[in-house]
Image (tube, grey):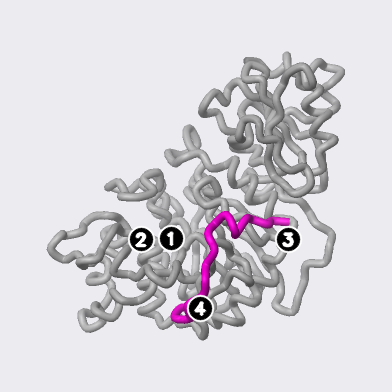
Amino acid sequence: MGLEPLLSPRDVHSADLIGTGYCTGTVEGWEGDCTRGHVGSWKIGPSMPNARACINRCRECRRCRFVSISIKNGECSWFSGCATGSLALVYGGDTYTTYRVKKRPKCAVGGLETPVQTSAKTNSSGGVHFVTFYSEGPPRDPGIPLGAMAGLVEATFAPHVDSFRGFTPSLVRSSTLAWQGQRVPGSRVVQASRVEATMNTGLSAIGQLAAKPYVILLRMLELAPGDILVYKDANIAKRPNLLAGAAELRELAAWSLAEAAPAQDVFIPYENERLKLKHHCKAHAIRTLAPADRWPTLYELPLHHSCQLIARRTPAAEAFLWAWLQACLVREVLEQQPDPPQLRHPEFRWHTHEQCLFSLVSALRGNTYARNLWFCWTLERHRSRELGQARHCPGPLAAAARSC
């Protein structure tokens, strides 16, 4: 379906045409929350007969800034944020047209639209910055299309930090990381894996997230010494809890670094009380990276939860991230194979790639914590827990995301 039939020329001034495709998926019939929400869907019908009515409805909805309209599907989806450079075309996306209805001062960063905030954002710990990594899907890269979800992550967190940066495989591939006279081309970390992963199979096509330490360090080197950098994964369809706690992110980041006091200034909370390296680190990785006398101890260490990271820019943090990256560049320890069955720990489940390697590097480089923190579902202070101190952890429905 073409773009022009949706709005007549006299209506074009009321909204900016972005292009064909939609921002992200919505639930049919769920209108969302115009006061605090990020996404919703209105039915095109008698009360909303055309695109113009959809746009007018968006103007009345406080949180709505973008709409994706499909006359064919009778749908007007609204969004508070949108990765305008990565509109989704799957599942009939070519029948949708996306418009920006409301403008505000912004700067384009990596295909995302980042609001420029004028409220005070400084504190005694320095600046707080946000970085993420997301695949855009064909034809831009062979990963799954997460650009629209990254747009919602941006809309949620950008108002509460000093900067927001989103990296894609294409951006990484065209970059080079230089640290203390050493260089790593971005093409190495997004090189397709030789073997499929047991879980998260879509990551095999973009290097099993070896790009994670790469983009974190690449962004950190652009910050002032002492500034805090927060990383979160962008796949909020898999982990909607990643959107929680945006308004308190600055305080949470400073609090986490103060409470955990990571020896190398890089903090990732532990997964939970139960999971250990023996469950999600293949024996070949442990045997390759660690001396034999440490193998039994390493198997019993708690596993870190790698979808969220908080770090302060210091020489120690840079060195740690570089070591994590170097481990991820060793394909035989990053990837699922080799994994000789006779070497597996009896309680081994599956290999977790960069997550396993973060835990291993932390142990080998002494990145110990003063408090061994983990979080119950959401990265919020009131949901923090400490290993070995049993506390009730409510289910995910009780930990509903509160992003603003």
Q: Residues within 10 Å of mark 2 (few under 14, many from 20)?
A: some
Question: Along the horizontal axis of the image, is 39 left or right of 210?
Answer: right
Provide the residue designation for mark 1: 184
Q: Residue 402 location in percent, x, y?
A: 68, 57
The three-letter amino acid code for the residue at tag 4 is Glu
The three-letter amino acid code for the residue at tag 1 is Val
Question: Quick one: label 1 or label 4, which is nearer the N terminus?
Answer: 1
Q: Are marks 3 and 1 in contact (CB under 8 Å)?
A: no
* Residue at 51% in and 53% down: 175
Question: Quick one: label 3 or label 4, which is nearer the N terminus?
Answer: 3
* Residue at 38% in and 70% down: 274
Q: Residues within 10 Å of mark 3 (few under 14, many from 20)?
A: many
Q: Are marks 1 and 4 in contact (CB under 8 Å)?
A: no
Overall secondary structure of the magenta section? loop
Tell me the SS state at disc 2: loop
The three-letter amino acid code for the residue at tag 3 is His
Specify the quadrant of the image occupied by residue 96.
top right
Provide the residue designation for mark 2: 329
Provide the residue designation for mark 3: 160
Number of labels in the image equals 4
Q: CA distance from mark 4 to mark 2?
A: 32 Å
The three-letter amino acid code for the residue at tag 2 is Leu
Q: Residue 311 location in percent, x, y?
A: 57, 72
Q: CA distance from mark 1 to mark 4?
A: 36 Å
Tell me the SS state at disc 1: strand
Q: Which residue range is magenta in the image?
A: 386-404
Provide the residue designation for mark 4: 386
Q: CA distance from mark 3 to mark 1?
A: 32 Å
Q: Residue 337 location in percent, x, y?
A: 24, 55
Q: CA distance from mark 2 to mark 3?
A: 33 Å
